[in-house]
Image (cartoon, rainbow, N blue to C red):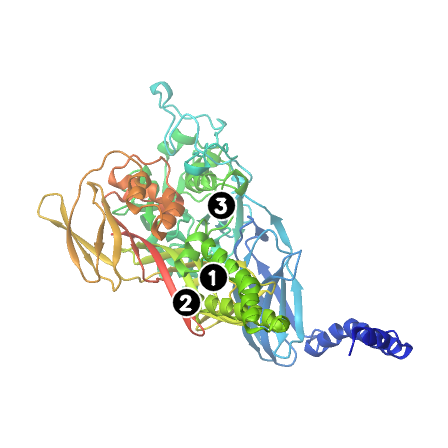
Amino acid sequence: MSLSTSSRLFRSPFLRRVGGLAGIAILLSSAFWPSLHAQSEEPETRPAMKGVDLSVKAGFGGLAVNNYVGGWVPFRVSLANDAEPVSGKLIIRSEYPNGPQGREFSTEVQLPSGSRQYYELPVFLNSSQKDPEVSLVRRDGSVVAATSVKIERQNFGWNDRLDIAVVDSDSATLNVISSAQLGRPAGREPFKASTAGGDQSPREPDTPIEPAAPPSRGRNRGFGQQQPAGAQPIVIQTEDLPRDTVSYDALSAIVLGDRPLGQLTADQARALRLWVAGGGLLVITGGADVVGLRSTGLDDLSPVDLKGNATVGSLSELNAAYGRFDTSDAILIMSSGLRSGSSLLMGTLEQPLAAERSYGSGLVRFVAVNPKLNPYRSWSGSKALWNDLLLPAAEANARRTPPWMGGRRSNHGGLQDSLFKLAGIEPLSSTYFLFFLLFYIVSVGPLNYIALRLLKKLDLAWLTIPAVVILFTAAGVTFAQFSRGWDSTEAETTVVELYQPEGIERTSGALLFSPNSKGTHEISFPGHDTVLNEANNQSSDPYEVERASAGDLLRVEMNKWTHGLMNTRSARDGAKPLVSIEQVGGGSTIAVRNLSAAAFNKAVVLTPAGTSDLFDLLPGESKQIEIARPSPSTFSNWYRPKLGTDDTESKIFGDVEERLDSVAEVAGFAGPSGANTQMGGAQKRASRPILVGFSDASPINVEFHGSVRRKSKTLYLIHL
């Protein structure tokens, strides 16, 4: 058919009418099809069931989200059913205001008629999300009961408030420090009387306390200094202490008052212990439940042997540092004795008034007074005393750098580039693209023309040109597939901090997952020691975390060859030793033995006497290592050049080097003053060597459903 004939047919009235009707049909179908399609997929919705009550307590004294990056928050949900049995899920969902993507956390629920049940779920929230919704949903998708939880306070960067949980029965306990600016006191050392001019006279009670000036270090230098944070005591009940370690993210310190502790579950006691080991500050007061501490095993954290209440005539050392009491009556305190390995802050070995001990990266402090009893309650020196007790939390908060002052916006830090390199997901060389494009142009043009000219078939150009295009497309896709591999790809970079004597292991890192197919991908992490939160997913769909007795299951919708970047965290006790170390003779030689099934490379041992050179250690291998005191330097300035600049180890080390500097102070380096909370007790454990080294074995207990090509790189910090 000629072009002119087809044009005449197209202009005929009959075809114009048919075309018009077809166009209308297409428009109508496009308008109504989405709604029809949505109706076919939506589950049946029935009204909320009467007789089912759902109540929620989130956070600590209200739901607060304190930074842009986000953190974990405990959601405590109580269900009561006076109606028919319910089988379904408890779902906590939070969405972003500018799109459908969000996070969904759920757990299976079997709610018989007449029953009451309690659930606690850790939920990850950040400051850009909407108020979360909590709902009980049947298996058919219909809602039984639902409510929303208002985010009462949001900070979009640096947290300007120290939330301090006070486990006490009096709602006014520690009101003396509400909104107080905590920091290093002016004119005296913490827990010491003023020594200006050699005079040991008591400090005036109304002497102001100057907040600490946070250090400006490393890559953040030049951005100015941060303002101190104000203290906010929040009185909570014993049952409000979380069952998951990550749920403590919002808290800066915990103070144990007179609330009974014997009712704590094993999960609550373990979570509190691991939170302290991870850098938390726990303060045990003179009003604490001694019997409850012993029954839950938390008494082991105390720096003193708690004996019970006792009365004394005076507390001259306390009065000399903070001012005299307005009473002449006998004074009630907690009688105790200092334990081995603890430090005395105030008082005597037989009767400490204040003491502390390191536990993992954290700190446990004891104060012999009960803050809610007189004369302490009305004492003008209470504010200064609690400033000194909570000073480590204030200084730790001051060291955190907000995003607009050069801080990192997510806790996977700068590991993204090293993850792509580790996974082998890197762009091809530009030379390859130039060669491919040049060969394509030559094939479509000159080569195609010459071949057809020789065959005297130039009229077939309309067929050969599309064939060449299809051939090059197929070749490009096939090459990409072979270079990428047929399996899903996973890469992880992790920092592991192991405290061998305590058996505590903490990990933090980043995980990159790139699937080989489109659909819902499942990642499970047995037990409840490991948590994953999505940091960057190229899908607009929400991801789901389902909690079960065997562990948690993460579901994320992803397209083929896209990637999801996730942050990983874990904390567990009962960890086995990985390395042993012994002194050889009386010299500077030590014997290091690898007790694990993984090799360590580029390892170094830090001791109070000095530092070893770098060495590798195979599984089960033992080596004799020489210890030598290096020239004064920060650990990062000494270790970084030995790693090189192009490998994955140097990239990982670059993200955590400031934390390692404080560890190196133990080994005699001229490190910076003031240690990060995660290494806060390093200086106090100067007798304990530390091994720093890399491994290719994965320390994360994560399982992928389907065939996955896995690669990992781990930096170990082992406190021996």
* Distance Cα–Cα, label 3 vs label 1: 19 Å
Q: Is residue 261 left or right of residue 131?
A: left
Ranked by sequence position, the earlier of labels 3 and 1 is 3
Q: Quadrant of residue 343?
A: top left
Please determine whether, in this image, residue 565 is positioned above or below residue 119. Answer: above
Q: Residue at x 47, y 57 (%)?
A: 427
| Residue under pointer 3 | 408
Q: Amino acid at mark 1?
A: Leu
Name the residue nearer the viewer: 657 or 211: 657
Ranked by sequence position, the earlier of labels 2 and 3 is 3
Are dots 2 and 1 in contact, CB under 8 Å?
Answer: yes
Identify the disc placed on residue 532: 1
Query: In what element is the residue under mark 3?
Result: loop
Query: In what element is the residue under mark 1?
Result: strand
User: Which circle, 3 or 1, is nearer the viewer?
Assistant: 3
The N terminus sits in image quarter: bottom right
| Residue under pointer 2 | 702
Q: Amino acid at mark 3?
A: Arg
